[in-house]
Amino acid sequence: MKKQFAVIGLGRFGTSVAKTLSGLDFEVLAIDSNEHRIQEISSVVTHVVQADSTDEEALRALGLRNFDVVVVAIGDDIQASILTTIIVKEIGVPKVIVKAQNELHGKVLKKVGADKVIYPERDMGQRVAHHLISKNIIEYIELSEDHSIVEIRASRDMVGKNLRQLDIRAKYGCNVIGIKTGVKMNIAPNAEELIDSEDILIVVGNNEDLQNFEKTFA
Ligand code: ADP
């Protein structure tokens, strides 16, 4: 059985989530209190409903209980976002993912039962900043508060050396978990494998160690 998704709040973020899931052939129920937002998305997603998500009865009537994942993407109205999260969790949805405006909002969401809190603006800001530091950093993904993954183009200092010689784990405390060469991806890189100028290294580590690594190689 394919997973069933609902997205509440069809601003830029919620709309993007709903459209992407729909494009990947998943059934999506899109909910917003604003009629225009509903109309705009109605040709793209499977089901659209105009409803106020702070109205518990309305959400129950929509059968939200049967959904696997609900994304709460209400941006500015923090009160509505918190109330909606409480209601959706009480209804019994196993996974509720909520967009937070700031750290405090995020903390409250966790306390009221959100299974995952996301900070799209903050995360995108971090990614852009990492790209700005160096064109060699292709991707930056935060795994937890302390750990991240970076995708970094092999620098001149790395080319022609192998992972043993570079000694990244001992010197920087980071682990190279994969090496991309064109479309090929090696997810168990050998210590003896020579790094090519076209290679992209996927490195995991704690943020401080990764920063030292980036400063040296990026
Ligand atoms: P973004 O920053 O992603 O564009 P917005 O804050 O602009 O997000 O959009 C949030 C959406 O959530 C809006 O379309 C708004 O109508 C909707 N929304 C806000 N409160 C409620 C609510 N109580 N019930 C349903 N939808 C809501």
Image (cartoon, grey):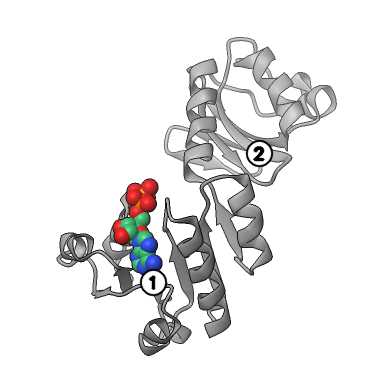
**In the rendered picture of this protein, how many numbered marks are placed on residues?**
2
Callout 2: helix, strand or loop? strand
Q: Position of residue 116 (x, y in %)?
A: 59, 60
- Please indicate, yes or no, whether residue 10 appears anywhere in the rendered image: no
Q: Give the residue number, with chain letter if any, for mark 2.
A: 148
Callout 1: helix, strand or loop? strand
The residue sitting at 72% across, 32% down in the picture is 207
Q: Give the residue number, with chain letter if any, for mark 1.
A: 6
Judge the density around disc 2: few (<14), some (14-19), many (≥20) Cα neighbours within 10 Å: some
Above or below: residue 191 compared with residue 99: above
Q: Nearer the viewer, mark 1 or mark 2?
A: 1
Q: Tell me if label 1 and label 2 are in contact, CB under 8 Å.
A: no
Q: Nearer the viewer, residue 199 or 71?
A: 71
**Does ligand 1 reach within 8 Å of label 1's beta carbon?**
no
Ligand 1 is in which quadrant of the figure?
A: bottom left
Displayed quadrant of residue 175: top right
Q: Is residue 28 left or right of residue 151?
A: left
Q: Earlier in the sequence, mark 1 or mark 2?
A: 1
Q: Position of residue 15 (x, y in %)?
A: 30, 56
Displayed quadrant of residue 209: top right
The residue sitting at 42% across, 38% down in the picture is 183
Judge the density around disc 1: few (<14), some (14-19), many (≥20) Cα neighbours within 10 Å: many
Q: Amino acid at mark 2?
A: Ser
Quarter of the picture holding the N terminus: bottom left
Q: What distance separates the C-alpha of mark 1 from that of mark 2?
A: 29 Å
